[in-house]
Image (tube, coloured by chain):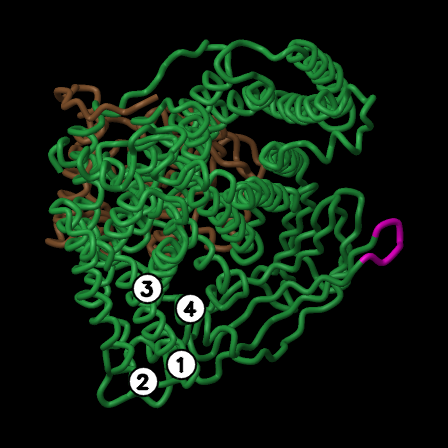
Chain colours: A green, B brown
Amino acid sequence: MINELGHFTLVLAFVLSVLAGTLPLFALRRGWHGLAHLAVPATMLIAAFVFIAFAALISAFLASDFSLALVASHSHSAKPLIYKISGTWGNHEGSLLLWIVILALFGALLAMGGRGMAWALKIRTLAVQALISAGFLAFSLFTSNPFARLDPPPVDGRGLNPILQDPGLALHPPTLYLGYVGLSMAFAFAVAGLIEGRIDRDWARHMRPWVTAAWCALTIGIALGSWWAYYELGWGGWWFWDPVENASLMPWLAATALLHSTIVVEQRGTLKSWTVLLAILAFSLSLVGTFIVRSGLLTSVHSFASDPARGVFILGILMVAVGVPLLLFAVRGPQLVSRGDFNIISREGALILNNFLLTSATVVVLVGTFYPLGLEMVTGARITVGPPYFDATFNPIMGVLVAAMGIGPLLAWRRGTVPGTRRIITISGVITVVLGVAIAMATTAFASGISIAGIAGIGLLIWLGSAIIADITYRLKPAKAGVAARAARLPAPMIGMWTAHFGMVVFLAGAIGNGLFATEVVVRAMPGDVIDIAGRQMTLRTVEARQGPNYITETAVIELREDGRMLAVLTPEKRFYTAERQTTTEAAIRPRISGDDYAVLGDGTAETGYTLRLYRKPLVSWIWAGAGIMAIGGAVAGIARARRRPLSTRAARPADNAYDTGSTAENDDDAAQKAGV
Amino acid sequence: MQDRPSGRPLRASFLIPLVAFLVLAGFATAALMATLRGERDVSQLPSTMIGKAVPDVVLPRLDAEAGDVGPAQFAGAPLLVNVFASWCAPCRAEAPALAILEEDIRILGIAYKDKPADTRAFLQQYGNPFVAIGVDRDGAGGMALGVYGVPETFLLDADGTILLRHAGPIDRRVLEDILLPRIQELQ
């Protein structure tokens, strides 16, 4: 009964989305404001229906209702509770429904909020959002119905892919989807703006919190995915340049660019058409990400959720969702007049450089991800380009970006440098050279020397770190008023910016520390053997069989010692999941700020000994900590803006808009009509 | 500061994103349709290398103390040369196929642009079907063989002549319909 209710509300949500996506746009054109305003309650109703459907699906998973095909093929009665819940989205149909739920949630948030936003823009944005919902609801209902029945129901389910039975997976898709779908809001704003033929500072002001939120969620989502791959795949790596990883990185890069270009639109009313294009592209890349994972077009370690037949539908959605806005952009884009009176050496100039580099990086990742596909079209060969390509292309671009990150925030809007900028640059430049040379010499003395790229990386890290600190110090410096008083007066967005940029420093420290100084030992060991790794000793005590809730294991007991002192007992496992008849490798990790000790158990028997892979990975957890700090920085800037909103609301109320004369809702419609909507 | 919806004409630069998208979308559509019809499949490359002697590639062995290794050392009997890397997802997919091939023919592995430690970890996880593995750190060996990427597989006869080149992972069809018959022919 609950299942039928879920299915039914999903159908209702679809019908309502089609109506809410079309009628308000039509009504606005005709000037029927009462009808157009129905977009607001309709959006809330869609959200309510979708939530009911999702709750129904979760309850089916909780109750292990194997009459649902989805539950039967992805769950098992003996599965722990948390994985019964997370199993809801550990499969194609469920994850799609989660996508739709978040989409509906964001729509409802805008419907309820959006205070101070021009009324017509809000209605149009909601309508575009409803159209996206309609597309995905159709996809769900017609190709991937989560409520499809099995008759007769099986006695027990087939279980969830064991590699996905993990707390990381419970969190990774929802956060990533928050980011992807958050970008749908930016997209809806962009399309609504194009339909109106008008993009202004107010538009950017109201879009920016959504971009910031999406960016924060994407940052955390990608970091969680990377962390999951680190401890679950047992490869000791944190990024594999896998197509699915790239699929999440591309929207992140585009969103990062969008985050910065939106600031330019909001502050200076310029870069409008570029920002609109970025908003469209960022969400398109999210869709492409979904497309890659779901369609089986690219070979990937994540191929657990692929099905070419569904790809056709996604491709259809993609064609409409990207093609139509780009057509709209081609027609309306030239009308977006931007003021261009700024010096190249200015905040605007720096942000344009930021956008140029981030876009280039996106293109590089796009090419690296799709080149194998293109090549396959031409020659039939199926290959990967892998890390060598990305090391040679992506890393240098990011290097330049990091170098620019040290200078950009010091520049003033419109013109040249602020006083003191030169001194900050000089100081951090000197620190970089001195420390960089010292570290290079030290590591050459201790280790077998490091590569040019490694030295460049360390140099960039120091450069950015010292530039941020120098900038903060400079702003606090004329200390007559007292440092604390000055610190309290620092604008929150600036603190957010520093925090996010500092997160980059921490991330780089992790990536470089782990990249340059990691130690790896692969041995075949008998119980009792002692293995030396990076000045520590690991003793294989025994390998024993253990029993988990729905799996049995082969568990190695390894003692980790430093100078005879016992640090920890590591217990890497090989798990055999009885229901799914699959084996997974569980690395044992002792994470510390200074670095991780990481052990993986390979094949072996008591007679021949066991293969062990042991790692010492300096600073590796800084990678994810850095991502976390970046997200916190984004949140600080975002919350600061939300707090400030009441002030700007007054200024931005349609009738007395400070920035755009004559932009009442009605006038918007007139203008839009003249533009030929 | 004000936007003027002044009905400006189309500008070429604003069409670029649309055109670029349509090209990409066309490619994706063609790929997807081919997948659905079952046509898009791994296949042999028409290569100028076929029928010629294998290039003289000499690489350090993965087990370092053992010196260098290259296809030339295995002359006298057929040889399969498999270019792979630990960072390559399709290479993981073809591991079972190589395990079957190992019983019929000697396989020389070339670890393309890969760190030896990573290669070892890869072999431990997915099995080692190779008689020897050459470490192709900078990709020069792969370049000499003319690979597009990884994985790629070459079948050589006893004289070291390239009989067949396969780009992409060896799946069941390639294994059973192409490689195994050709190898049986040779023996």
Query: Which label sits on residue A59?
Result: 1
Q: Secondary structure at mark 4?
A: loop
According to the picture, the residue beneath numbered tag 2 turns out to be: A2
Mark 3 or mark 4, which is nearer the start of the sequence?
3
What residue is shown at x 63% (from left), y 33% (from top)? Answer: A491
Label 2 Cα neighbours within 10 Å, binned few <14 / some 14-19 / many ≥20: some
| Chain of residue at mark 4 | A
Tell which subunit mark 1 falls on.
A
Mark 4 and mark 1: span between their CA atoms?
20 Å
Q: Earlier in the sequence, mark 2 or mark 4?
A: 2
The tag earlier along the polypeptide, 4 or 1, is 1
Q: Are marks 4 and 1 on the same chain?
A: yes
Nearer the observer, disc 3 or disc 2? 3
Q: Nearer the viewer, residue A174 or A367?
A: A174
Kindly report which numbered mark, 2 or 4, lies closer to the viewer in this rendering: 2
Closer to us: B154 or A178: A178
Q: Which residue is mark 4?
A: A161
Magenta stretch containing residue B169, yes or no? no
First of labels 1, 3 by sequence position: 3
Residue on which disc 3 sits: A44
In the image: residue A482, left or right of residue B44: right
Q: Secondary structure at mark 2?
A: helix
Work out whether residue A437 can be spotted.
Answer: yes
